[in-house]
Amino acid sequence: MHSHRLILNALILFSTLALAGCSDRHEPEQRASDKIVELTYWPAPNPQEVQLADTLVREWNLLHPGIHVSMQPIPVSQSTEEVLLAAIAGKTTPDICSNIQPAALYEYSRAGGIIPFDTFPDFDSVARGRTPLDLLEPFRSPDGHYYQIPWKTNPVMMFYNVRMFEEVGIWRAPRTYSEFFAAAKKLTRDLNGDGQIDIWAGERDIRPIWWQRLFDFFPFYVGASTGKTLFKGGVPDFNDDAAVEVFRFFQECYQKNYFPHTYFQGGDPFLLEKKATHFAGPWEIATLRSLAPQVRFDVALLPVPDNHKGPVYTYGDYKNISIFGTSKHPREAWEFVKFLLQPRNDLMLLKITDQIPVRGDLLKNPLFAEYFKRNPKMVRFAEQALYTRSIDSGPDLKEILDAISQEYEACAVYGRITPSDAVTDAMKRTTMIVEWNK
Amino acid sequence: MKTFLKYLVLGVGAIIFAYPFLWMIASSLKPESQIGGLGLYSPDFTLHNYTQVFTRIPIGRAFVNSLFVSFTTTFSVLVFGSMVGYALARLQFAGKSVIYAVVIFTMTLPFQLTLIPQYILMVKLGITDTYMALIAPTLMTAFSIVLFRQFFLQIPQALIDAARIDGCSDTRILFQLVWPLSRPVLITVSILTFMTSWNEVLWPLIVVRDRALMTLPQLVTLFTIGGEAESLLGLELAAATLLALPVILAYAFFQRYFIESMASTGIKG
Amino acid sequence: MKLFPTSERPRHSKNRTGYWFVLPYVIFFGTFVAYPLMFSFILLFHRWNIVTPMEWVGLKNFERLLRDPLFFKSIWNTIVFLFIHIPLQIVVALGFAVLLNSRLKFRGFFRAVYFMPVVVSGVVVTILWQQLYAYDSGLLNRLLVMMGIDRVPWLINPDVAMPSVALMATWKNVGIYIILFLVGLQNVPNELYESASLDGATAIRQFFRITLPMLNPTIVVVVVLSTIGGFSLFIEPYVLTGGGPMQSTLSAVLYIYNQAFYFGHMGYAATLGFVFALIILCVVLLQRKVIESESTS
């Protein structure tokens, strides 16, 4: 690392000298330092991503003396959306942000001020060179422009406790709803005969919290519908069999008592080995490694309806990159974005944050081979990443997911309404919210 | 037999209203594992829950914040409320009836109507997350003006006239002559204002996000539902006890005034 | 009678002092009541998240309100609350007031104890009752189990949760109404009872014929204050249930709060506030009319 930096320094010294030599002859020296372009870059505030951003920005600044990037993590105190919306209103947005939630993009572009990437002539080749069209296309806005470029994703998959499965004689993760129920029936057990269940097949927070649906209803819906999301062309579009199937699945999980009806107190039941399955993203690997190293786990695709055909899609928690309209140097900002997307920097992203870059060649490019050899469980996520969908971009996604949460509570947890009523009601309220926002 | 039954019912009533508080205080002193019990006593009484509360949240600071906010509000309501009440009761000026109508109008306004625009006003004034935001909307209350006015109407005109002839200004008459005669209404307004301010949660939750400025009930609420208490009953009960204790102590000493003051809201309403 | 200067000068100064004395209130009213009130009328026709500029939406907020199941749900929840809270409160308060009104030792003590929950913060009461209501380990269910009765799902069953909130609210507030009824009872002239006794009316008859009608104004107060209280419920569901299960304890103010500060819909929240305020005013006026006309008929 040290020698590497030394060479870089030497290179920079040399190039500046050379440049200085040039400018001496043609124009006054003052102009050269005037021409240093200043860019601001906002990464996510979590320690790993700040570390990654710090490393990348340092390297960039060494390589590009004419374009200076300063890194400023988004304040932790508020949510990223709040901070960015306030910044857009106050015209204090950075040039580049790499923590754009696709769901919030609608609000950002409505507030004014995101530059479409497709205005840069080499956008197509850069974006398609990295990301397959199937994953790129969902991020094209209804007006045909790309205001965001997918950077990384965290696919939601099923973690399962291998020991518990083996104890009841199951040697393969369930792939369909029926297989899941068959396993759940064996897994849910009262170990000491006190009438209280000690091991649950699964568990979800029973409170209707909107973002919880990103770990049950939504990924299951994406799976059951082979890659559909909640909207189509800005219109709610989930009034279909897949949605009903998903509600029915969760209703049965509660009805048959495979999932507990009460709020689980005392910590994460998967870490405590009180539930056999858990729906989560790759970050769970690190959590398990540090907090519960004794848990023997593996990762599998989410269960799908019995008659399912084709690949199993799931929800991917995407974080994308955008350039803001306030940027005085969009061209230079684009250069920096391209730098972030380079294969070796994607490798750095993998290594430092354990999150999946949205690349088509992750498992083919020898550059990444060593990482996946050392982190075999991450291979599952890298494979799955090619079949992920983000949550839609639209107005009031939070409230729409809240509406779905209420139906989830009424239908699945309490079994008070039928799955098809749940879907109809959720559609109704979603339509009301969308029309109010028109 | 009849008297026995009467005392039995009254006694059961007393247990129903008082026992939960005793249980709360007792349980806050017990180790977590013993809190489920119905009884009060435990051989293992400990201050552990309290030390935990003090280390986890700035509850001392919140106590001071609440005291400051409640005292300032009460002082302001007393001074300005009595001034308006005095003007409406004893002074002649054009537009008096309009002002009185405005006061009555304000009193009948449901707070649901002004909650959101009042918050937006705080945002526009740029005073969210300040003491000002906590205090400003309750600097004066219509109810206190009405109480003052009603009380001041009963003060004999002769007294006021005498003071005027002596050359007293109305300011002096109000604060040096009328105030000393108005102990009951001053006490009523003080207790009502202080209690309302001390117990208010919704408004602080809306205008204050900075923990250093939170009031006691607000901090305790967020501590309980925000996960910082980690669903440990002992901690929640200890925090609740700390919030209740000052009021219960004050109530123990000035019980009669409390009852009369707070019942007056009903009699007037 | 009075000398010229003294009669003229005070009146002059009186005029001015009046203005000086009400001036702070006028400023206060203008800033913290009139301005928000006017601004609320602007908000009714806008969509606004505070951060980005306001958007004019015409009557859309009202259209939405009429189609919003949660708006109607919160009204229904308030009705459920009041339906249990008001009768319970009147019966309990009246009962204790009648007992306290008889010749009694320790009257002051009982009165003080019953009144205690009134002065303590709603936050304390709610945290306390959350423990009492807990399904597995709560005090109330332990008592029931000891008496051989099944556990009650106080807060976790959507049909029971709001009645539980109403029960808790009664426990907290009934002290005030005991005092009010007590005051009312003491104002009933003794001659009325005496003449009734002479006519041979039983105690029960006397209660319904004399006491109740005389207490009518107090009952109006209980009903009106409880109604306003029902529409103002916030901290109870906020701490106890978060509005659940299945939105069964979502109150009017909690819904306004959620719309404004959880979803960032200031305009819609103001619209909800406006409509709830109208409803409160109408209901209260109606209640007064009904109860007062009943007493005269």
Image (cartoon, grey):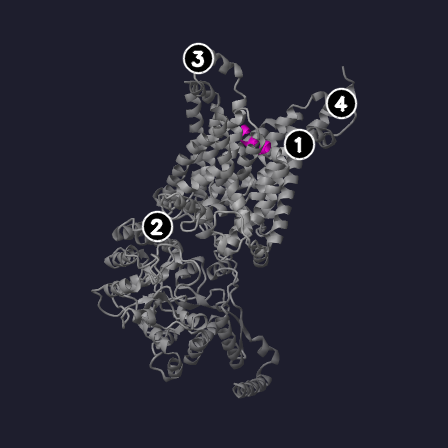
Q: Chain of mark 4?
A: B
Q: Residues within 10 Å of mark 3 (few under 14, many from 20)?
A: few
Give me the residue at 70% from left, 31% from top.
B179
Given residues C81 and C11, the one toward you in this image is C81
Q: Chain of mark 3?
A: C
Q: Which residue is mark 1?
A: C19
Q: Residues within 10 Å of mark 1 (few under 14, many from 20)?
A: some
Asked whether the residues under the numbered discs 3 and 1 touch, taking CB atoms below 8 Å apart as contact, a structural biologist would say: no
Q: Which residue is mark 2?
A: A435
- When the figure is inspected, residue A268 is found, relative to residue B82, above or below; the finding is below
Q: Which residue is mark 4?
A: B162
Amino acid type shown at disc 3: Gly
Main SS of residues in magenta:
helix
Specify whether disc 4 shares its chain with disc 3.
Answer: no
How far apart are the alpha carbons under marks 2 and 4? 70 Å
Q: Which residues are magenta?
A: B259-268
Q: Position of residue B3 (x, y in %)?
A: 50, 26
Amino acid type shown at disc 1: Tyr
Closer to the camera: disc 3 or disc 2? 3
Q: Position of residue C272 (x, y in %)?
A: 43, 42
Q: Is residue A245 left or right of residue B156?
A: left
How far apart are the alpha carbons under marks 4 and 3? 58 Å
Q: Residues within 10 Å of mark 4 (few under 14, many from 20)?
A: few
- Which quarter of the picture shows residue C183? top right
Asked whether the residues under the numbered discs 2 and 1 touch, taking CB atoms below 8 Å apart as contact, a structural biologist would say: no
Q: Which residue is mark 3?
A: C200
